[in-house]
Image (cartoon, rainbow, N blue to C red):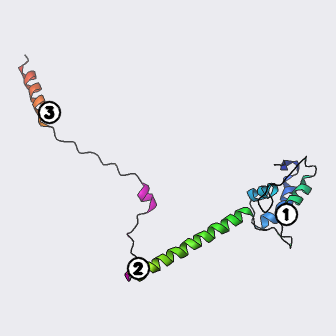
C-alpha cells in the first residue's frame, strides 16, 4: 500500500522524518516502515488516508523503542548481519590457517596473485609472423612465371 506523500510539503515531510534520518535510516527504510510492521508483516489498510502527517506518525510509531527513539532499520539490520557473517568467515579462515600451520609445521604460502585489472585485461595483440611459402605455392608461382615468360 502506498500513500501519495506529495500531499504534504517536502519541508513538512523532512520535519516528520528527521528522527529516522538522524538515526541512519535511508529513504527506502522509511518507505519499508510505512508499508510493514517491525516483524515484517504488511500493514493492513482499508480506506483513504485523510491526514497524511498523522498516518505517517502512526505507522512510524511502531518503529520506536520504549524511549521513543527509532529502532534499527531494515538496511541497518541487514548490514549488521552481513558484517557478522564476514567476521565469522574471517574467524573460520584464521582457524583453518592455524590448523594447517600446526599440521605442516609452518604457515601456508600462497602463490603471488596478479592484480584484478591485469587478470581481466585482454591478451595483448601480437602480430602474427607470416608463414613461409609452401612447396605447392612455390611450384604454382614458378609455373605462372614460366607461362608469363613464354608469352610474346
**Residue position for label 1:** 62
**Pointers 2 and 3 in contact (C-beta within 8 Å):** no
Earlier residue among tags 3 and 1 = 1
Q: CA distance from mark 3 to mark 1?
A: 87 Å
Does dot 2 land on a helix, a strand or a loop?
A: loop
Quick check: 144 left or right of 72? left
Residue numbers of the magenta segment:
104-124
Task: Bin the neighbour count of mark 1 within 10 Å (Cα to Cα): few under 14, some 14-19, many 20 and up.
Answer: some
Q: Which residue is mark 2?
A: 107
Which residue is nearer to you in this view: 115 or 77? 77
- Mark 1 or mark 2, earlier in chain: 1
Counting from the top left corner in percent of width and height, residue 108 is at: 40, 76
Measured as percent of width and height from the top left, residue 47 is found at: 91, 46
The foreground one among 52 and 103 is: 103
Q: Main secondary structure of the magenta part?
A: loop
Q: Where 71 sits versus 98, above or below?
A: above
Residue occupying the point 85% across, 63% down: 62
Mark 2 surroundings within 10 Å by alpha-carbon count, few (fewer than 14), some (14 through 19), many (20 or more)? few
Across and down, in percent, residue 28 comes to: 74, 56
Amino acid at each position: 500500500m502506498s500513500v501519495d506523500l506529495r500531499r504534504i510539503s517536502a519541508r513538512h515531510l523532512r520535519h516528520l522524518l528527521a528522527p529516522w534520518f538522524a538515526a541512519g535510516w535511508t529513504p527506502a527504510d522509511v518507505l519499508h516502515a510505512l508499508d510493514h510492521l517491525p516483524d515484517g508483516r504488511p500493514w493492513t489498510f482499508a480506506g483513504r488516508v485523510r491526514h497524511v502527517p498523522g498516518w505517517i506518525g502512526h505507522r512510524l510509531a511502531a518503529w520506536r523503542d520504549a524511549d521513543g527513539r527509532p529502532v534499527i532499520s531494515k538496511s541497518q539490520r541487514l548490514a549488521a548481519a552481513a558484517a557478522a557473517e564476514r567476521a565469522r568467515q574471517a574467524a573460520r579462515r584464521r582457524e583453518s590457517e592455524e590448523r594447517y600451520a600446526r599440521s605442516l609445521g609452518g604457515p601456508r604460502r600462497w602463490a603471488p596473485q596478479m592484480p584484478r585489472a591485469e587478470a581481466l585485461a585482454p591478451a595483448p595483440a601480437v602480430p602474427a609472423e607470416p608463414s613461409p611459402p609452401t612447396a605447392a605455392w612455390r611450384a604454382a608461382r614458378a609455373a605462372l612465371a614460366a607461362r608469363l615468360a613464354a608469352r610474346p
